[in-house]
Image: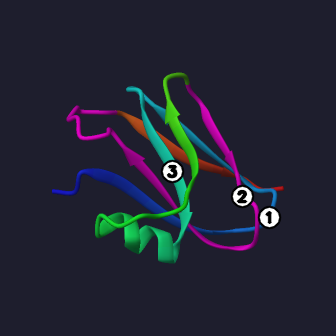
Amino acid sequence: MADFIHAREYLESGDVVVVQCSHQCNVMVMEDASFQHYRHGRSFHHYGGYFTRFPARVTIPRDGHWNTVIDLGGGRANIRYNINYMKA
């Protein structure tokens, strides 16, 4: 079982990723190469961060495929979540 929740979507500059979650968590939005680094425990670049209040909103800086990751930071919980996209 993965330690994170993942969704991938083609988004354009100015689109917004909107995440609702029942627990505080890391919401990270990253391109494919950074997602691979994240999965393998290497240094990676992302947008977003640790959120304690929702909805979390992350604006996309450029067109491309983007990976949205919800990560509890090593914790475990039975969470309820929703990932939506607001098109610019």
Neighbour class for label 3 at 10 Å: few (<14), some, many (≥20)?
A: many
Tag 2 or tag 1, which sits nearer the N-term?
1
Q: Residues within 10 Å of mark 2 (few under 14, many from 20)?
A: some
> On the picture, is 86 further left or further right than 4?
right
The residue to which callout 2 is attached is: 60
The span from disc 2 to disc 3 (Cα, nearest Å) is 11 Å
Q: Amino acid at mark 1?
A: Ser
- Amino acid type shown at disc 2: Ile
Segment colored magenta:
54-79
- First in residue order: circle 3 vs circle 1: 1
Dot 2 falls on a residue whose secondary structure is loop
Q: From mark 1 to mark 2, how far is it between C-alphas? A: 5 Å
Residue indicated by mark 3 = 28
Quadrant location of the N terminus in the rendered image:
bottom left
- Calculate the distance from the C-alpha at mark 3 to the C-alpha at mark 1: 16 Å
Q: Residue at x 35, y 52 (%)?
A: 5
Question: Which amino acid, mark 3?
Answer: Met
Q: Position of residue 52 (x, y in %)?
A: 49, 23
Residue positioned 53% across, 41% down in the render = 49
Label 1 CA crowd tier, 10 Å (few <14, some 14–19, many 20+): few
Give the image quarter of residue 81: top left
